[in-house]
């Protein structure tokens, strides 16, 4: 028997390691258009101790190791570029603590967004966490590793990594370290006031260590929810409209979107505004203040609120929304990938026009939009392109469009988020040499054998 | 593989909604819950099937294990995000099994089950003459011209727990004056799980044999013990020429509890486990709850995963007989009984002989016998009337 396989099986149990062709096939690819690459083993640890042993073994044997959460990144970040071990973290899904008095939770990294959501709803209904737009099987750890954002990112402080109060991480050496207040006292309330080392692992796509536990901020969960939809034909007014709404501080979440389908929506810019409140009176006031903020546009007949039937409101107030996954079937083909570029709010009109140009050039359909992050410090502007998985030519076209979109996003002053290896190259080409040098030195220090998700965040020769 | 299915398998996005119930509480796909590899999720199966049909992977033992571990519980159908493929997911998995059966590429327990069904007509390899022994001493007539035929099925005919359940239902029907008879040794397996395991030819043979006898005897209305039999006779037999008015026994009880049945009392907290072939397959969630709720003294407590979100016991899709999923902490049955205990209920009510056996065994495996006992709905009604 393969000795590495046997050693891994001794750590996690033979049921939780596989080198069978079926597992290697599935874990070699994701839902996007990036090329598949086979791992050698798929391993599912059940504890930090097991992760430590596996990573130590991989380090000793110089085997690449790729941590994986919900496997929903779409841009190939968990595809093992140089083979090795894919570490499926979803068995580590325990909710370890919910501190209701201090509004934080501590979870294992493989805990799914949906499970934490359901747990809070049942046991702590006054609290919630910020969920991404991804399906509910997306994991908390995976989202942190890629700098995710989502519902509440507008109103509650920004990216999900900014909501992290502490981490436990397994280093390439096999050591487990705690970062944040949990390193010093037995509470996971904050990353301050000590030096913030958590940033060495957030947004690094697993290239510096394996995140095993996370402290996460929780937020009030008011019982009433409503949603408004504002519509205009003038993309150049979007920035002003968005800031008018943001500055009321009455909205929980704000997202802008455009779509050529249904046909009657084509050419319109839509802004979805989610509002929550603890009473009818509060809700009424919030909705009114938001309406007032854009009164000028309404009075000039340049824009207005779209009446939403109750059934549509029910769909829209939910998070995450199932219909986002439905986008994969627009081409009757089961696939989509998107460029999500982080950029200033003011770049929206230019980003939108660039998207139209690219999709028109490649004759592909699209969905575009932007989620407001951090009270308008930036947006995550997405260009989503569906494709037909059974049509290789269509896949090639979409891959080209994605590459061009990455380039365009950088050109207009944005930075592609959780981007493919090729997109990472574009970022690194533009990065200050000193910054890249520092990244490389940090990685060498933390991972001298280069086993942690190699191929990511490094200049390709 | 039917062209209709081959044309759509690439449309699965593998987004993972299929793993969860609609309240996201925990993994609700028994095979994924047990194995945890992406390959054992419905999305994983869809992608592997495409790879297999395209020749990218071979017909390995692992592939067989992956396909035959599906319990056909339809959680994925309920939870899938893609409206144009969701309803066909389980049909596609069954079609894949048909292809594997055709190639004789099945795990040994599946082979043994199908062999026993072919040779003995039942999975227990017992004589056909013993099909009616469950009714011994109950004075139940053979079906002649009664209003209903009581169709018992394989588990009710041969399995100890199933036989106990069949006796409970029959006793209750007798005591309350329902006009019914049984086929006894003339009954044939309903074939539901044979079909689910991909042996379409054998299923057809069994269905036609049953339909022949039922038509010959002039049966019009059928009460089934098992939701599996209910599903086959109600939904599949019409295509093979068998058109009957079919009820699951809880539906009959539900109606009787309203007026004709003298009610007793049972002071107990009860939680009900929805059988997949009654619930998600046939959209019947209320009849058993109505029957239980009609008993004075019973307090019904719902598990968090109930009705369309119910976690399967793990016995569907033939797994009751093949045990591909096996036991253990992550087996659906063991997770389910722990969930039942969390409600504070002292009785876990079931309406399917397969669920009964699976959950009863799980209570023992989890050493929960002092906290909860498994009873079928008819047993509970009978106990209330003592």
Image (cartoon, coloured by chain):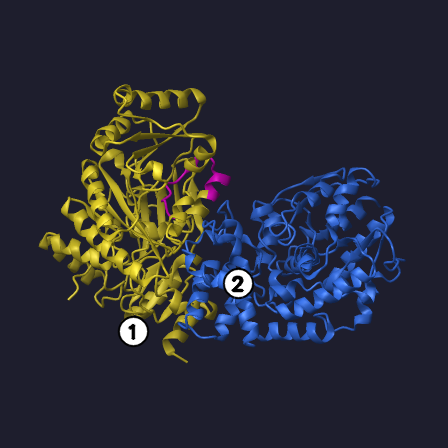
Q: Is residue A71 visible?
A: yes
Rounded to the nearest angstrom, the CA distance separating label 1 from label 2 is 40 Å
Front-lying residue, B223 or A29: B223
Rendered view: A42 above or below B13: below
The chain that appears blue in the image is B
Disc sitting over residue B93 in the figure: 2
Q: Quadrant of residue A51?
A: bottom left
| Residue at position x 26%, y 43% in the image | A380
Q: Which residues are magenta?
A: A118-134
- Farthest-out residue, bottom: A1
Residue A263 lies within the magenta run: no
Q: Is residue B306 visible?
A: no
The image quadrant where one finds the C terminus of chain A is bottom left
User: SS class of the residue under badge 1?
Assistant: helix
Label 2 crowding class (10 Å Cα cut-off): few <14, some 14-19, many 20+? many
Residue A119 lies within the magenta run: yes
- Farthest-out residue, left: A433
Colour in which chain A is drawn: yellow
User: SS class of the residue under badge 2?
Assistant: helix
Front-lying residue, A453 or A13: A453
Label 1 crowding class (10 Å Cα cut-off): few <14, some 14-19, many 20+? few
Q: Quadrant of residue A192?
A: top left
| Percent of width and height locating residue B134 | 81, 63
| Percent of width and height locating residue A421 | 23, 59
In this rendering, would B122 be left or right of A245? Answer: right
Q: Which residue is mark 1?
A: A61
Circle 1 or circle 2, nearest the eye: 2
């Amino acid at each position: 028997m393969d000795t590495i396989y046997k050693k891994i099986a001794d750590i996690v149990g033979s049921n939780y390691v596989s080198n069978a062709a079926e597992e290697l096939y599935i874990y070699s690819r994701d839902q996007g258009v990036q090329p598949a690459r086979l791992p050698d083993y798929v391993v599912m640890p059940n504890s930090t101790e097991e992760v430590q042993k596996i990573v130590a073994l991989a380090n000793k044997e110089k085997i690449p190791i790729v941590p994986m959460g919900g496997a929903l990144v779409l841009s190939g970040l968990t595809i093992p570029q140089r083979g090795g071990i894919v570490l499926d973290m979803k068995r580590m899904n325990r909710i370890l603590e919910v501190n209701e008095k201090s509004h934080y939770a501590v979870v294992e990294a493989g805990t799914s967004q949906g499970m934490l959501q359901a747990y809070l709803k049942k046991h702590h209904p006054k609290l919630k966490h910020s969920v991404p737009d991804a399906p509910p099987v997306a994991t908390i750890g995976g989202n942190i590793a890629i700098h995710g954002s989502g519902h509440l990112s507008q109103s509650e402080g920004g990216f999900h990594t900014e909501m992290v109060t502490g981490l436990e991480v397994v280093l390439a050496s096999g050591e487990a370290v705690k970062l944040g207040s949990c390193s010093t006292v037995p509470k996971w309330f904050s990353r301050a006031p000590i030096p913030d080392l958590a940033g060495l692992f957030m947004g690094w796509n697993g290239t510096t260590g394996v995140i095993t536990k996370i402290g996460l901020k929780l937020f009030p969960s008011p019982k009433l929810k409503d949603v408004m939809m504002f519509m205009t034909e003038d993309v150049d007014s979007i920035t002003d409209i968005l800031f008018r709404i943001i500055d009321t501080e009455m909205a929980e979440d704000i997202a802008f979107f455009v779509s050529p389908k249904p046909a009657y929506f084509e050419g319109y810019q839509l802004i979805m505004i989610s509002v929550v409140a603890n009473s009818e009176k509060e809700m009424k006031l919030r909705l009114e203040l938001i309406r007032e903020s854009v009164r000028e546009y309404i009075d000039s007949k340049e824009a207005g609120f779209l009446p939403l039937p109750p059934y549509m409101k029910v769909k829209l107030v939910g998070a995450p929304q199932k219909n986002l996954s439905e986008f994969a079937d627009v081409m009757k083909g089961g696939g989509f990938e998107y460029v999500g570029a982080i950029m200033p709010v003011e770049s929206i009109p230019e980003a939108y026009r660039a998207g139209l140009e690219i999709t028109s050039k490649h004759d592909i359909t699209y969905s575009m939009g932007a989620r407001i992050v951090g009270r308008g410090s930036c947006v995550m502007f997405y260009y989503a392109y569906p494709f037909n998985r059974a049509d290789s030519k269509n896949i090639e076209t979409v891959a080209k469009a994605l590459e061009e979109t990455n380039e365009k996003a950088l050109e207009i002053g944005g930075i592609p988020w959780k981007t493919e290896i090729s997109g990472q190259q574009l970022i690194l080409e533009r990065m200050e040499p000193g910054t890249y040098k520092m990244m490389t030195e940090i990685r060498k220090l933390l991972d001298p054998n280069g086993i942690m998700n190699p191929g990511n965040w490094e200049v390709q020769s | 593989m039917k062209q209709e299915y081959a044309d759509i398998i690439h449309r699965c996005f593998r987004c993972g909604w299929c793993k969860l119930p609609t309240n996201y509480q925990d993994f609700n796909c028994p095979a994924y819950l047990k194995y945890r590899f992406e390959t054992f999720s419905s999305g994983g199966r869809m992608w592997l099937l495409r790879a297999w049909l395209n020749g990218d992977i071979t017909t390995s033992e692992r592939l067989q294990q992956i396909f035959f571990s599906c319990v056909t519980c339809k959680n994925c159908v309920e939870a899938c995000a893609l409206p144009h493929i969701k309803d066909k997911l389980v049909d596609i998995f069954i079609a894949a099994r048909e292809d594997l059966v055709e190639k004789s590429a099945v795990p040994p327990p599946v082979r043994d089950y199908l062999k026993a069904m072919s040779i003995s007509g039942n999975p227990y390899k017992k004589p056909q003459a013993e099909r009616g022994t469950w009714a011994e001493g109950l004075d139940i007539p053979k079906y002649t011209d009664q209003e209903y035929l009581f169709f018992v099925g394989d588990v009710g005919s041969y399995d100890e727990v199933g036989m106990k359940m069949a006796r409970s239902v029959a006793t209750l029907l007798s005591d309350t004056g329902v006009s019914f008879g049984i086929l006894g040794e003339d009954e044939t397996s309903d074939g539901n799980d044979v079909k689910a395991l991909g042996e379409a030819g054998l299923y057809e043979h069994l269905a036609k044999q049953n339909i022949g006898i039922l038509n010959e005897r002039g049966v019009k209305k059928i009460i089934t013990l098992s939701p599996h039999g209910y599903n086959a006779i109600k939904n599949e037999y019409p295509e093979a020429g068998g058109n009957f008015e079919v009820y699951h026994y809880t539906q009959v009880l539900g109606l009787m509890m309203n007026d004709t049945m003298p009610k007793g009392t049972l002071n107990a907290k009860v939680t009900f486990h929805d059988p997949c072939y009654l619930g998600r397959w046939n959209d019947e969630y209320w009849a058993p709850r109505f029957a239980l709720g009609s008993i004075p003294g019973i307090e019904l407590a719902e598990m968090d995963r109930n009705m369309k979100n119910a976690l399967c016991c793990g016995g569907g899709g033939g797994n009751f007989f093949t045990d591909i999923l096996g036991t253990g902490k992550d087996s659906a049955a063991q997770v389910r009984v722990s969930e039942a205990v969390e409600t504070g209920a002292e009785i876990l009510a079931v309406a399917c002989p397969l669920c009964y056996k699976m959950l009863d065994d799980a209570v023992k495996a989890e050493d929960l016998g002092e906290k909860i006992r498994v009873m079928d709905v008819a047993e509970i009604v009978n106990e209330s009337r003592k």
